[in-house]
Amino acid sequence: EGMTFTNGYATCQVCSPSRASIMSGKFPARHGITDWIGAPTEADWRNVGRFNKLLPPAYEHGLPHEYITLPEALKAGGYKTFFAGKWHLGSKGSWPTDHGFDINKGGWDAGSPNGGYFSPYKNPNLENKEDGEHLSMRLAQETVHFLNENNPNTTGQPVFAFLSFYAVHGPIQTTQEKWAKYRQKAMDLGVADQGFKMGHFLPIRQVQDNPVYAGLVEAMDDAVGAVLNSLSELGLDENTIVIFTSDNGGVAAGDAFATSNLPLRAGKGYQFEGGIREPYFIKVPGLTKGGEFTNTPVTGTDFYPTVLELAGLDLKPNEHSDGVSLVPLLKDKAIEERSLIWHYPHYGNQGGEPSSIIRKGDWKLIHYYEDGREELYNLKNDLGEGIDVAKDKPELVQELSLTLFNYLHKVEARFPMHDPEYDAAQEKAYLNGVIDRKWPQLEKQRMQFLSEDFDPKNNWWGSQLTRD
């Protein structure tokens, strides 16, 4: 029913920076939240025990209050604003209601569902109802309730609802019914003997046969359907803009609850397309007809000006300084070619490397901070980023690198520093341990999840809680 943006991106390979970009219209290098809020930095990074060459820089741990956020701009334009789900943009004092939302259901410090995906949730901003209730559907129901109580057709006041699912973040959990459904699908497709391939730091999943992950995705899809159905039932489907996107790629490494994003390389936490390319759909009644596609590269900073223009409100270029309105694309016109920039001077929990990225046209340049090397990919011809052509195009590498670092220095981006205590032998021993012990363990767990005798011995069939 809307337009599909086939080159749609999050502004970061992990969650908090991307979410801050949607709210602010700024790239992470500018707003300063360059990693998930709560990650260790500087000398504290040594405590992680990965013995890396670099120490990640300190960064902002809350959305700056001086910004006029997207919900604040809409609220000033007469909208009633609602938030449900994952926030992860600061602790108390920097929650959704501190940044423009009138109502907050479930948004707080944590990036993971503290009690898992089944009630009780252990969430200070979401009361428990029935034990075993599914979190994704509960958040959808809260959104539907808000639309019911504040139907613009009745009140005359427009509304802005931001439904931010915790799914599909760890802990990965599903029901036995959905697990059985996707286990059978994996069996029908044939189970590969090997599910992982060693990356730079960690094994990366190569096959999409995780029935637990798939079940969690379907539960979110059920919840999306409940909201969309309610728009029709409430008579709002013909005057409501619907946007669907994500904050990073699917988890492809780090634990056995990962999935595969192939043909996109790697996943969450990585500098490759699997970490940053996202679902990106926009439906505008009377403008989009359905089945439309655009290949123009777009990103999370573009929602802010796009929504303002569609709402008939004045743009705020000093706020959404790294975004552009996509209304011309929705009207089947063009926007001016520009550079998209990513800055992640951190080590991803999933194995990504400290790096910065620039994409312009079909070209993507990755700068690595450990050794200063640069890789160049033509995404039109090499979506899987398997052919580095940097040596063949030195002038293009120089041009893109100059543009990238001019921007980073302009916004006073922070960079990683060499660890004076770095010991190459310690890092090598750690990586050998990953290959010799962790990788076989991941393969074993993968087969356990696919076994007909799989029994997690709890009511949610879940994984370990993660914080990132």
Image: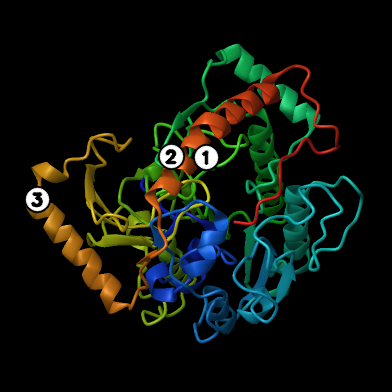
Badge 1 element: loop
Mark 3 vs mark 2: which is more N-terminal? 2
Residue wearing tag 2: 266
Circles 1 and 2: CB atoms closer than 8 Å: yes
Residue wearing tag 3: 394
- Compare residues 281 and 12 and report the one nearer the observer: 12
Looking at the rendered structure, the kind of residue marked 2 is Ala
Residue 443, how many percent across, how many down? 58, 25
Dot 3: few (<14), some (14–19), or many (≥20) neighbours within 10 Å? few
The answer for how far apart the CA atoms under marks 3 and 1 are is 32 Å
- Compare residues 393 and 253 and report the one nearer the observer: 253
Badge 3 element: helix
Q: Quadrant of the C terminus?
A: bottom right
Looking at the rendered structure, the kind of residue marked 3 is Pro
Q: Is residue 263 above or below residue 16?
A: above
Q: Does residue 363 appear in this view?
A: no
The numbered dot on residue 253 is 1
At a point 49% along the width and 68% down the height, the residue shown is 43
Q: Is residue 52 above or below residue 62?
A: above
Dot 2: few (<14), some (14–19), or many (≥20) neighbours within 10 Å? many
In the picture, measured across the screen, residue 15 lies left or right of residue 444, that is left
